[in-house]
Amino acid sequence: MNTTAPPSYRFGISGLQRSLLLFVVLPIVLLTALGIRFGLGQANQFQEKRLKNDLELIGRAISLPVGNALNKGDMHAVELALGSVFVLGEVYGASVFDAAGNRIASAGITESDLTGTTIPDRIRSTGEGQEAFSRVGGRHLFSHFLPLFDTAGQIQGLIQITRRASDFGHALQQLTIIAWLVWGVFSLVILAGVLLGHYGGVGRHVDKLLEHMQRVAAGDLSHRAALDGPSEVASLALGLNRMLDSIEQANRQLEAHQAAETQLLAQLKDNEKMAAIGSMASGIAHELGAPLSVIDGRARRLERSANLDEQQLHNLAGIRSQVSRLTRTVNQLLDYCRPTAIRLRDLTPAVLIETAVEAIRPELEAAGRALHSHIEADLPTFRGDGGRLELALLNLLRNALQASRSAITIHAVEERQQLCIRITDDGPGLPDHALETLLEPFFTTKSPGEGTGLGLAIVQAVAEEHGGSLQLRNRPTGGCEASLCLPLTREEPNHG
């Protein structure tokens, strides 16, 4: 992800601001400019019409006294009437012409002769006033012509009232300057308002959102954007946070899958290793079984001889003891490595437990340990492999015997449609290892020669064969409690 800020933000104008300027500010500025242009045109027309009307009113105001003076032939009165126009308004000149266009009297700057123009003819034909622009003495003039009537209502001449043509534009010049200055200030205010409003309302929140995204792009996936600003920006921030949450969750799932895969691979390797060890151990056990039986048999025959002294008998007893230990180890290897197919039949819990207790009683007596049995009355029968279950109980009893100081207790109760056989001892309790480790084959905390590490592994295998479970825990009063729980339902247990 590119962590560099967009170029538009480095120069102060963002793409969104450019869009606002192009599609909002520029249309407003152009529309206001067109409005001002149209308004100035209308004002110019109004002002021009007003000035023309002023001239017409001035002409009509003096047409009556001038007409009367002409009827009387009083030229002095005509000149006085013409001179009065400069008092009535902003007039540049006034003249009186006869019907043919010859000037009779004048005041100020006016046309000297109208005979070469069409104005007298148009006035005589229409009887209405006329307007015209002309150049007199190097100056542009605007003239308004009005007819003069005699007592009979006939046109006897015409009056010309003039003013400078520049007067029409001069009146609007100042207004035009002010209008365009106001338009310029208005445009700048709109521009500044849009830019500042965008930054205050949107831009600064977008900048913050970009900063959050840059932190994420730099690798800080735990960072989350603040949900402030307008709803649209807050929605973007919320979407970014949800995307980061999804990525984080996906990473956790990926890590969990990788960990599970690593653990599975380790378990597969362990299983392969244990399978290889089990295969080798099975072969060794089969090979050792026959020689050990031969050794034990010959040692037994030697013990029966009458010509052996006490030391020799003691040595033979030691040989038989070691052969017995080796034979038990071989049997455990065979029990662990043999196929797990079980033979089901109806079993009575009390009989099963009593059979296992009788099998280990010689070892209990030799070690001087007491065994207390507490078997719940009326325990229901269940289906199982008596030989495999007896083997499991023997291993649990033998472990309790080796750990105990004085006594072992065995309880048998029905709990939640299960037969739970609990064997407790008064020994030091479980070693400081995980339960999974204690159940691993060939793992033992006992001294060399005291255990093979297969006892609990065999019990666990038998429990799984019957759909049950093995539980180990330390007792609050001291010692260890091993619980073998087997289902009492009518469903067939697992045959392996």
Image (spheres, helix red, strand yellow):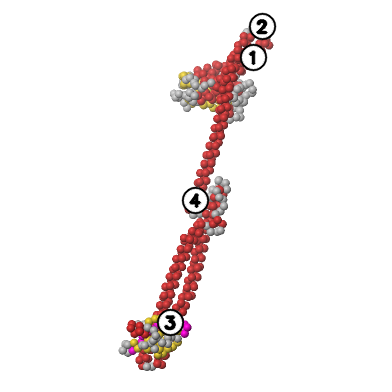
Q: Residue at x 68, y 8 (%)?
A: 309
Which segment did they paint magenta?
137-150
| Contact check, label 3 and label 1, Cβ < 8 Å | no
**How far is the residue under mark 3 from the one under mark 1?**
154 Å
Q: Earlier in the sequence, mark 3 or mark 4?
A: 3
Question: Which residue is identified by label 3?
Answer: 134
Identity of the amino acid at label 1? Answer: Ile
Q: Residues within 10 Å of mark 3 (few under 14, many from 20)?
A: some
Q: Earlier in the sequence, mark 4 or mark 1?
A: 4
Q: Nearer the viewer, residue 452 or 372?
A: 452
**How far is the residue under mark 1 from the one under mark 2?**
18 Å
**How far is the residue under mark 4 from the one under mark 2?**
102 Å
**How far is the residue under mark 4 from the one under mark 1?**
84 Å
Q: Secondary structure at mark 3?
A: strand
Identity of the amino acid at label 2? Answer: Asn
Q: Nearer the viewer, residue 42 or 414?
A: 42
Answer whether residue 19 is magenta in the image: no
Q: Is residue 316 above or below residue 61?
A: above
Question: Which residue is identified by label 4?
Answer: 236
Question: Which residue is identified by label 2?
Answer: 307
